[in-house]
Amino acid sequence: MIELEKLYQIFLTYNEIVTDSRKVKKDVLFFALQGTHFDGNTFTADAIKNGAAYAITDDPENASGDQYILVDNVLQTLQQLATYHRRKLGIPIIAITGTNGKTTTKELLKNILIEKFNTYATKGNLNNHIGVPLTLLEMNKTTEWAIVEMGANHPGEIKQLCEITEPTHGIITNIGKAHLEGFGSFEGVVKTKSELYDYLSTNNGTVFYNGDNPILYSKLSEYNNIRKLAYGLSDHFYCNGVLHSYNPFLSVELIEKNHKEIIKTRLIGKYNFENVMAAACVGKYAGYDLKTISKAISDYIPQNNRSQLMEINSNKIIMDFYNANPTSMTAAIENFSDLDSSQLKKKLILGDMFELGNYAEIEHKALIDKIDTLKFTEVYLIGPIFKSVNNNSTYLTFENTEEFKKYLMSHPIKDSFILLKGSRGVKLENICDQL
């Protein structure tokens, strides 16, 4: 078996890593990972044939030749290599986790830090036990700051990702009801997200936190060996700001002694206030003035169907279907209810929320009860869970997006202001061409 230091020297020579044999090109390192429905070891010969410098495998039968590197476990080796590389870099790393707002906070913060520092941040949703090590291995000796997003849907995952990443700073954006199927309960979510605090406390790290969030405030009171910098509404916090407006785009007023700065974002939803403040807080810590922070955040344009405002034909649509859980769905609906529709009829198109386990029917019914208290012209619910629990005859339900698309062909939606939100698996993007 190869020693980690020797593998690291090979990595420094051929530092592009590929785990998908279909993406192999000349002089990459192919890590033959195993998944539920595939075994990368069966593609090592193809990887070498297609130009890979080396194939890292844990199957002796697929390790014949100088270009094959045999290890005990490919995934563990990838993770160990990433940690080894991270230690060699010796840079500050901010870990971001939470139920909602991880990616938005990451992107806002990246926009700030790159003004002065060579900054690397997680790309896309590479935030799990495979994505995080790949993210670390993308960094190089020119990287000065790093932002690593950490996702989890089972207990212990944030702990593992922290041990791989060894962050020096951290943010838990918030803690809400998501992935209850994997966590078992809301208490399980709190415990798992707090594993970031556990790590930073043990390693004398720094936490940036929403001082107005009672759950985070309460959890942090349990830790002593940790530097705590609060952001939020109070002028006693390290970073102070107030909600300026949110119709439709969010504006935030940052306050520092006698200086105030308005941040005019391209984000939809007052719930993004805490994401803006988190990024601003780290920006202040990193030495930026309010004007620079304001410009960097204002320049950020959301993508990937995360609170994007689009105009299609005669409709205005808030595209917010990258993901959904009870906490984010409730916040989005309440915010939408508050917005000025400019004479357009307000309509909800909502998809099922996934990974709620035994809580699925309860949470979907609670969401319908919430909708009942608000005023919308029409409500469309898509997915088998919504269909099974809906008891409001005025809300139309559909088994899937294909069924809804057929309905739209004979019942087109026009001159409307629409919130389109649901879990990615519902595939709400399939109906956009019908709106």
Image: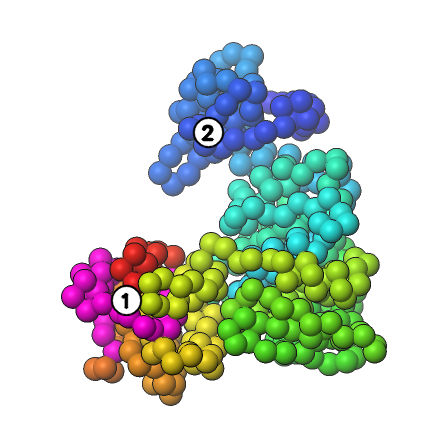
Instruction: Say if the magenta span includes residue 397.
Output: yes
| Residue 31 visible here | yes
Which quarter shows the N terminus? top right
Indicate the secondary structure of the residue bearing disc 2.
Answer: helix
- State the image coordinates of residue 92 (x, y, percent, origin top left): 75, 49
Q: Which residue is mark 2?
A: 23
Residues under labels 2 and 1: Cα distance?
36 Å
Instruction: Say if the magenta span includes residue 353.
Output: no
Query: Which residue type does callout 1 highlight?
Result: Ile
Q: Which residue is mark 1?
A: 382
Residue shown at 67% from the left, 78% from the top: 242
- Of residue 404 and residue 50, the one placed in the foreground of this image is 404
| Circle 2/circle 1 CB separation < 8 Å | no
Query: Relative to 225, is 368 on the left or the right?
Result: left
- State the image coordinates of residue 233 (x, y, percent, origin top left): 69, 79
- Of residue 71 and residue 379, the one placed in the foreground of this image is 379
Query: Which residue type does callout 2 highlight?
Result: Lys
| 100 lies above or below 156 | below
Q: Residue furthest left?
A: 410
Span highlighted in magenta in the image: 395-423
Residue shown at 50% from the left, 18% from the top: 51
User: How dense is the environment of label 1, judged by Cα within 10 Å: few (below 14), some, or many (20 and up)?
Assistant: many
Residue 11 occupies which quadrant of the picture? top right
| Residue 371 visible here | no
